[in-house]
Image (cartoon, rainbow, N blue to C red):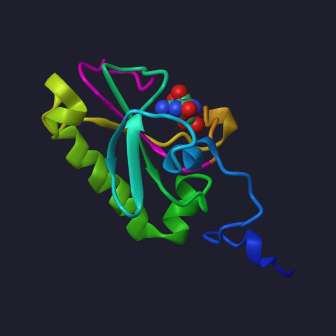
């Protein structure tokens, strides 16, 4: 079976509509950005579900979810995790809850709660309940 170039994992489909997160990267949509590098952007979730709720997002929208990212660019996945860790230790990003402990969530698929198909890590901080992953 042949696979079209645009459908290969890690290849950007140049005809794809920009995702909401690409529009934040392009400053077409405002966001409370707490970190940006050449490869990654981090901003506060518009509907926070914890005292601190950041999204850490690769600038490329080539990967729909964390499985595609792990297969296509594991170094970029490691970059996301390292960024989350640094932000959790940063009083500017995490405020009074900074201190290197955090919860990292990748919703993967619509039935698991994913609504934006541009891979992103939810980074949650602050007092979080044990025994539940919901918040
Ligand atoms: P998902 O449900 O795909 O795992 O997570 C998507 C997240 O993106 C949700 O928590 C939602 O609140 C957040 N989100 C969606 N649109 C925007 C937006 O325009 N700005 C910001 N800051 N967050 C958004």
**Residue at the farthest front position:** 28
Closer to the camera in the image, 131 or 19: 19
| Viewer-proximal residue among 100 and 38 | 38
Q: Quadrant of residue 12?
A: bottom right
Horizontal side of 80 relative to 111 (left or right) equals left
Query: In the drawing, does residue 121 fall left or right of residue 52?
Result: right
Give how far across and how far down residue 70 sits, in percent.
49, 63
Task: Specify the segment rendered in magenta.
Answer: 118-135
Q: Nearer the viewer, residue 16 or 11?
A: 16
- In the rendered image, residue 65, in percent from the top left (x then y), is placed at 58, 52
In the picture, measured across the screen, residue 108 lies left or right of residue 38, that is right
**Looking at the rendering, in which quadrant would you find the C terminus?**
top left
At a point 54% along the width and 70% down the height, the residue shown is 72
- Relative to 110, does residue 117 appear above or below in the rendering? below
**Residue reaching furthest bottom?**
2
Is residue 116 a member of the stretch shown in magenta?
no
The majority secondary structure of the magenta stretch comes to: loop
Q: If the image is split into quadrants, where does the N terminus sit?
A: bottom right
Taking 83 as reference, is 119 left or right? right
Q: Which percent across, then down, holds residue 102?
A: 26, 35
Q: Quadrant of ligand 1?
A: top right
Corner quadrant of residue 101: top left
Please say if 72 is above or below 93. below
| Residue at the image point whose x is 43% and y is 68% from the top | 74
Q: Is residue 125 magenta?
A: yes
The residue under the point 76% across, 78% down is 5
**Image quadrant in which you'd find residue 98:** top left
Residue 120 place in picture, x, y as percent: 49, 46
């Amino acid at each position: 079976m042949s696979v079209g170039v645009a459908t290969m994992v890690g290849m950007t489909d140049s005809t794809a509509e920009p995702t909401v997160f690409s529009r934040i990267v392009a400053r077409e949509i405002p966001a409370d950005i707490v970190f940006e590098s050449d490869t990654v952007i981090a901003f506060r979730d518009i509907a926070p579900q914890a005292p601190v709720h950041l999204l850490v997002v690769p600038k490329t929208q080539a990967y729909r979810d964390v499985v595609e990212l792990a297969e296509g660019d594991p170094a970029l996945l490691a970059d996301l995790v390292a960024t989350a860790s640094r932000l959790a230790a940063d009083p500017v990003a995490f405020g009074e809850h900074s201190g290197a402990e955090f919860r990292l969530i990748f919703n993967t698929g619509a039935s698991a709660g994913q609504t934006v198909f541009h891979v992103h890590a939810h980074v949650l901080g602050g007092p979080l309940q044990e025994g539940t992953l919901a918040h």
